[in-house]
Image: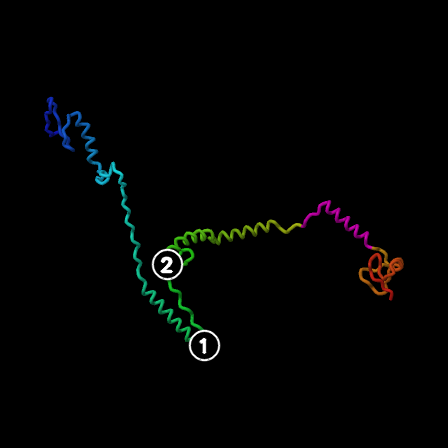
């Protein structure tokens, strides 16, 4: 407040001017006002919207400004590349026609042209337009991450499998329990008891000169053994 000229108000009270706004205050009030006034003047003021103030208290809705849409970037013309591809196609067609007329083998087709507007997938190296590339690249990325081939990891798996098989050793024969063994023994004994032991009976294969028992051919009388169902030989 040094250098400020005091002013005598009514009641002989000295008033001092504010250095920021120029208004006059008493000495005790000016100390509080000075700090507040500096903060207010240092703060950036928002631009005054007179339209908003005029529309207050009315039923007119405020219209928000729509942001201007950005125009898509103009793509470079690739007429030169298209022209060269067209000429190569015509030349290849003429060569094929001439080869057919002369009976020669057909020449190889021209290499496929690359569309510069297409985007190449960094995982499968195929090319797509912009809309299809956005969908495909994310899908191809997930698929390639699942199918990552690690030679060291694959060799380690094969080695561990071979070691596991070597530790297992040869296959053991299945063990026969006592109940199963008794059942097999009884079956063998029953089969032995059912086999005829008479030496006069015919064997499994009929041999000339072998005859069945008299009881069989007397009882059956049809030339067949009633016990073993073997054909009799009366020659």
Question: Secondary structure beneath disc 1?
Answer: loop
Relative horizontal placement of residue 50, taking residue 219 as reference (left or right): left
Q: Position of residue 180 (x, y in %)?
A: 72, 47
- Quadrant of residue 25 in the image? top left
Is disc 1 surrounded by few (<14), some (14 to 19) or many (20+) residues within 10 Å? few
- Quadrant of residue 93 in the image? bottom left
Q: Position of residue 196 (x, y in %)?
A: 83, 55
- Above or below, comparing residue 55 to residue 74 in the picture: above
Extreme residue toward the top, this view: 11
- Above or below, comparing residue 59 to residue 93 in the picture: above
Question: Secondary structure beneath disc 2?
Answer: loop
Extreme residue toward the front, this view: 59
Q: Circle 2 sits on which residue?
A: 118
- Of 175 and 94, the residue lying toward us: 94
- Of 108 and 94, the residue lying toward us: 94
Residue ID at (36%, 61%):
115
Residue ID at (36%, 68%):
86
Q: Earlier in the sequence, mark 2 or mark 1?
A: 1
Relative horizontal placement of residue 212, taking residue 128 as reference (left or right): right
Q: Circle 1 sits on which residue?
A: 103
The magenta stretch is: 173-195
Q: Position of residue 80 (x, y in %)?
A: 32, 65
Extreme residue toward the bottom, this view: 102
Q: Position of residue 30 (x, y in %)?
A: 17, 27
Position of the N terminus by quadrant: top left
Q: How far apart, in angstroms, are the residues tagged by discs 2 and 1?
A: 39 Å
Q: Main secondary structure of the magenta part?
A: helix
Is disc 2 surrounded by few (<14), some (14 to 19) or many (20+) residues within 10 Å? some
């Amino acid at each position: 407040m040094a250098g400020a000229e005091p002013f005598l108000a009514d009641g002989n009270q000295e008033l001092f001017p504010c250095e920021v706004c120029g208004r006059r205050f008493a000495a005790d009030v000016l100390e509080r006002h000075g700090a507040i006034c500096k903060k207010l003047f240092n703060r950036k003021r928002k631009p005054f919207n007179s339209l908003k103030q005029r529309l207050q208290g009315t039923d007119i809705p405020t219209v928000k400004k729509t942001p201007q849409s950005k125009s898509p970037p103009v793509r470079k013309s690739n007429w030169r590349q298209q022209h060269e591809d067209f000429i190569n196609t015509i030349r290849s067609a003429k060569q094929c026609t001439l080869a057919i007329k002369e009976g020669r083998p057909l020449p190889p087709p021209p290499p496929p042209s690359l569309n510069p507007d297409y985007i190449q997938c960094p995982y499968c190296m195929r090319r797509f337009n912009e809309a299809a590339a956005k969908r495909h690249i994310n899908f191809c990325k997930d698929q390639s991450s699942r199918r990552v081939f690690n030679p060291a990891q694959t060799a380690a798996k094969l080695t561990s499998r071979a070691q596991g098989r070597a530790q297992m050793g040869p296959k053991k024969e299945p063990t026969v329990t006592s109940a199963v063994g008794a059942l097999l023994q009884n079956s063998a004994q029953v089969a032995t008891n059912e086999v005829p032991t008479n030496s006069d009976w015919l064997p499994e294969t009929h041999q000339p000169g072998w005859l069945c028992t008299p009881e069989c051919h007397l009882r059956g009388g049809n030339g067949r053994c009633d016990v073993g169902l073997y054909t009799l030989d009366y020659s």
